[in-house]
Amino acid sequence: MKPPVSPDDWYRSNSANYTRSESSRRNAENFRMDTTRLIQCKDQLTMKTQTETSRWVGERIVDIAFWSNEIKHEIEQLMKATETLRQMKFRLDKAIVETEGPSQVTWECLYQRQKRMGSDQVDDDVEKELLQEVAVIKSCQEHLERVRDKVKKQLEGNRETQHMLEMDLNDKHTAYEIDSKCYKFINCNTNVNLYPNLNKMDKSVSVPKTWARFSEDNILRSQAERMLSLKVREEVERLLEKTAADMWNQFNQVNVAFTHRITEIAEAKRRLETHLAMTLQEMFQTEKTITDLEQAISDKRLPLKVAQNRLEERTRRPNMELCRDPAHTRLLKEVDYIQDTVQTLRQRLSEAHNTLQQLADTKSILEHELFVKANSLFIDQERCMALRKTFPSNPRLVGYT
């Protein structure tokens, strides 16, 4: 059995309980007040953090919108440059097609001129200018095709750059929608969930500096491609104008050479006709001379007969009457003279026949040359110049129509 407690002990025990109670309550009150302050502080800090996060998300949305607008504008500019370059390629294609007609005409002229005959098969200025025209057209075609390949390559570069910009724009559109959705999230939303440990995962592939530089590099690449497109367009424009001018200049050079050659052939033909007419006239006169010579020879037969008969009759003179008198001497001279005359006339007749033959040969040569000249004139004037009456206009040569 425990001993009884003294009154002092009882008072001391109660006093200790009171003190312990007051201390416990004071500690609990302090803890409660500290906890309330902590809750308020954390609530304020959470709200501040959330507000700052929303602000950063909003700024990110603005950044995305800015770069999206920049990319859209660049895509529009690049598409315009590409379309202009595509139209330039279309002009190039048409210009290359337009060179085929003049090329065929030139080759046809060369082919037709191979049909020239005889002395007219000459390597004249027309032939040289036609060969030069072939070279000019071929050179123009090669330059046009070379620059067309450059245009094709530039169009491919533009398409690749546009594809990169469009991919970047699509990614930014997706990011804009995601960040806009995030910006609208509030604490009272019912469709928000907890994703534990997600903050420990980092799938980032860029930082703001590299993110902005990526779009900036794409835009700079697009601007560089647009600048190259402009240079290619200017090169194409200069080349189209140069090839058109070169082809027109050579076309005119060939036509001038044709005109000069046709004039020469026509003049040669006219002179040949004149010489042929004179030769025919001379042949007529020579034939008349032959007739006159034949008549003159024939006319000498009777005087010769008379003289020879006189000589023959006088040989019958008797005895001393057979005298070499002046009459006999004269008769001998007469016979000799007539015979020499006939011989001279026969010689001249032979020469006249030779002259007539030479004139006939000359006439044949002149007639052949006239045929050759007429053939050449027909080829150059009727065939070739008829083919060269039409030539692509300057707008067609530069691919506009």
Image (tube, rainbow, N blue to C red):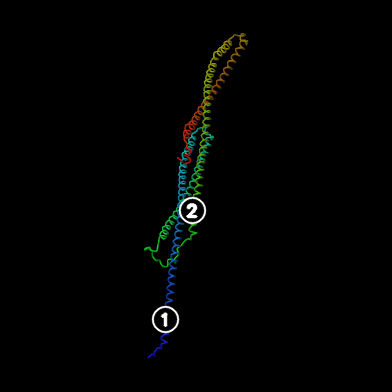
* Between 273 and 339, the one nearer to me in the picture: 273
Q: Residue at x 48, y 53 (%)?
A: 219
The correct choice, above or below, for 171 with respect to 368 in the image is below
The correct choice, above or below, for 200 with respect to 119 in the image is below
Task: From the top left corner, tell me how far across and down residue 368 is, in percent.
Answer: 50, 28
Mark 2: give few (<14), some (14-19) or many (20+) Cα within 10 Å: many
Q: Which residue is mark 1?
A: 18
Task: From the top left corner, tell me how far across and down residue 19 is, in percent.
Answer: 43, 81
* Disc nearer the start of the sequence (1/2): 1
Mark 1: give few (<14), some (14-19) or many (20+) Cα within 10 Å: few
The picture quadrant where one finds residue 9 is bottom left
Which marked residue is nearer to the observer: mark 1 or mark 2?
1
Task: From the top left corner, tell me how far across and down residue 150 is, in percent.
Answer: 49, 48
Q: Is residue 344 left or right of residue 27?
A: right
Q: Which residue is mark 2?
A: 219
* Between 366 and 46, the one nearer to me in the picture: 46
SS at badge 1? helix
Q: Amino acid at mark 2?
A: Ile
SS at badge 2? helix
Q: Is residue 13 left or right of residue 224?
A: left
